[in-house]
Every structure is written in C-alpha cells, then in structure tokens.
Image (cartoon, rainbow, N blue to C red):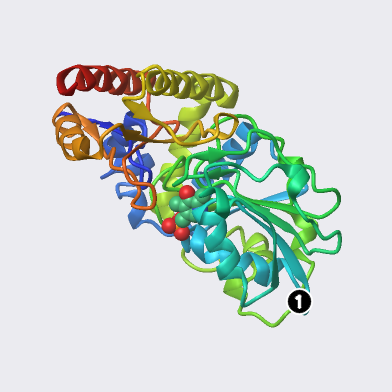
Amino acid sequence: MSRVWNFSAGPAAIPSVVLERAQRELLDWNGSGASVMELSHRGKLFIGLAQQAEADLRELLGVPDDYAVLFLQGGATQHFAQIPMNLAGDGDSADYIVNGHWGEKAASEAAPYVRVNIAASSKSDQYLRLPPRESWQLDPRAAYVHYTPNETIHGVEYHEIPDVGDVPLVADFSSNILSEPLNVSRFGLIYAGAQKNIGPSGLVVMIVRRDLLQRVSRPMAKIFRYAEQAANDSMLNTPNTWGWYLAGLTFQWLKDQGGLAAMAERNRAKAELLYQAIDGSGGYYRNPVQVSARSRMNVPFTLHDSALDAAFLKESEAAGLLALKGHKALGGMRASLYNAVPLEAVQALVSFMKDFAVRHG
Ligand SMILES: *Cc1c(COP(=O)(O)O)cnc(C)c1O
C-alpha cells in the first residue's frame, strides 16, 4: 500500500491513524456486530459516541458552558444563508468583512435574509492583503459581524481575533479550526465545514453562544432553526453519523498529539519551512500574499515561468505529492498544510521544489 503526501485544499487529508482505526472497526464497531453507519442514531451506542465527540471538542477548544456545540449538515455554504436566518430579524443589517472568495460568497448568500453591509473589503487588492481592523466601517447596531479568519483560496489569515465591541462576532473557521488554541468566548458563533481540518465532507461543526439562539423568531421550518437543533442534540433528523464518528476519532487523535498548543507549534513549523523555501528560491517560486497576512494553512505559490506548471504538477505527482494544483482564481500551485499533513510531507515538498528548480533551471 502506498499513501501519498496529500496537500489537497478540501476534502483534505485525514490522519492515517484515524483511517486505520476506522478500517479496523468498519465491520464491527464497538462490539455491535455492525458498522457505525448501520446503527440507529437514537441508540445508546451512537449517543455515547456523539456525547464523547462533543466532550472532546469542548476540551480541545475550551468551549465555555454557555455555548452550544452542534453537528450539522449542509456544508459551510448552507450556513452562509442559515446564519442570517437565525441571527437577524426583520429589517436588521449585518456587517461583512470580505477578505477573500469565501467571505464574498457568505455575503452574497446572506443577502436574501439580512441587509448586508460590506464593512471592509480587500477585493481591490485581489484579496492578497487583509483589510486592517482600523479600516472596518462597523455599525454598532448590526445584528452581527461576519468574517473569514482564513481564506482557503487566497491564502490569507487573520492572526488576531478582531475586537468588534458588543456586536456578536461570527466566523467561518472552515479551513483553520483546531489548528491552534482559540479563545471561543470572543465569538458569538463559530462554524466550520468538516472537510478541511476535521474529517469527511457532509458535516458542519458549529459553536454558538446560547443566548443568540433565542434572538429572533421569524417564521422558519424547524430544521433550519439552530435553537431546535440545540434542543435536540443536533438530531432533529438523521445526522451524518459516519462524519460524526470520524470527527470524533480526529478529536481523540488531536488529544493524543498533545492538543491544540502542540498542533499550533507544528503548524507554525510546517508553514515556516515552506515559506522559507519559497522566499529563499531567488524568485524561482513566489507567494503573492502580504507577509503579515500569510496563511499557515493554505500556501499559494507560482513558478517564475508558468510554462513550467504542467511539468511541476506531473513530476510532483510522480514523486508522491498530491493535489498541488492551485485554484483557478490565482493559478500556479497551492499547498494546504492542515493538521493531518505532517512535517515530513512539507519536507518532501520542499526538497522536491529545490530539486525541480535545479533540474529545470
Ligand atoms: C471550503 C470552504 C467553504 C465551503 O465549504 P462547503 O462545505 O463546501 O460549503 C466555506 N468557507 C471556507 C473558509 C472554506 O474553506
């Protein structure tokens, strides 16, 4: 069996030990004689799994008791719409910080449900810089402020949590959740599609301050209402049991790795190694992002001559380095360095890049 180093932006790498355990347990999970996918979500065994996963996530992130943890479906994109449905009432406005592709999407999907105020945007900088907090035109009466701490496509990341006063801060953490310790109490709502840093697609993890759940009462089907999901332990209908199971295994793996402080240390070392290789290549490789805004998770880079792109992709794949093709918005390459990507993978990439530059001159 040969497993490659996987730099995919999402769905992305899952830790081998998690996959191996899932494989071992596939036919007979927890002595049930059946796979976890074949059991009722209402049964004692699955409820135990769900509770353990939530407890482990709460421990990892230090989630305070006045926050609910939800395991939902629909992808981050569905929640671009569902968040304003739940947090904004008739006539309310919400502030959106647009610092990349996903923030732009979040604002446009919210527009049918709330008056969207673009309080800051770095579109005119091609999203390669971040709008500094001082430039945000916030409305103190806004229902909430939404931003994207890490923009997966453009490779920009806010390294500090912005202060927005008493207005609830809502953050799409899809591509950097669990990559470092986080002060959850600074947020009103955190959400993340699972397929980058948690597990398989089809699951969204949400952490929301409980008082916000009671905020608005616009007519809405129960299935869309976060308060109903919280009251029913995210089991208003059949949840993504397989995704929930793999997320739980990943949380246990993170605890075994030493928790989020240890992950932060590793993620810093991985990103540093790659950025140093790019910056030290004498212009052979280039990362276009403002240095202070560089993402630790997603590293886009170009070759000095785009005519070499095809050779770079072909040879890197042959060398066991998967999914380095950049997003079409930026072209070139992108390496995603999520939690499940070990330092050895980045070492292999950097050594391939040096070798490629020598061979292709
Ligand atoms: C991938 C991604 C999304 C989209 O997630 P879906 O689950 O496909 O809807 C949204 N936001 C960010 C930051 C992402 O990285």
Residue that extends furthest to the bottom in the rendered view of this protein: 219
Q: Secondary structure at mark 1?
A: loop
Q: Position of residue 117 (x, y in %)?
A: 71, 66
Label 1 is placed on what type of residue? Ser
Q: Is residue 254 left or right of residue 285?
A: right
Q: Is residue 94 visible?
A: yes
The N terminus: image quadrant: top left
The residue depicted at 79 percent of the width and 43 percent of the height is 163
Q: Is residue 97 left or right of residue 43?
A: right
Q: Position of residue 5 (x, y in %)?
A: 27, 29
Q: Which residue is mark 1?
A: 217
Bin the neighbour count of mark 1 within 10 Å (Cα to Cα): few under 14, some 14-19, many 20 and up. Answer: some
- Front one among 230 and 109: 109
Kindly indicate the quadrant of the structure image that contains residue 292.
top right
- Front one among 57 and 9: 9
Q: Position of residue 251 (x, y in %)?
A: 50, 35
- Front one among 240 and 7: 7
The residue depicted at 73 percent of the width and 79 percent of the height is 218
Q: Is residue 26 above or below residue 357?
A: below
Q: Is residue 36 left or right of residue 293?
A: left
The residue depicted at 45 percent of the width and 31 percent of the height is 339
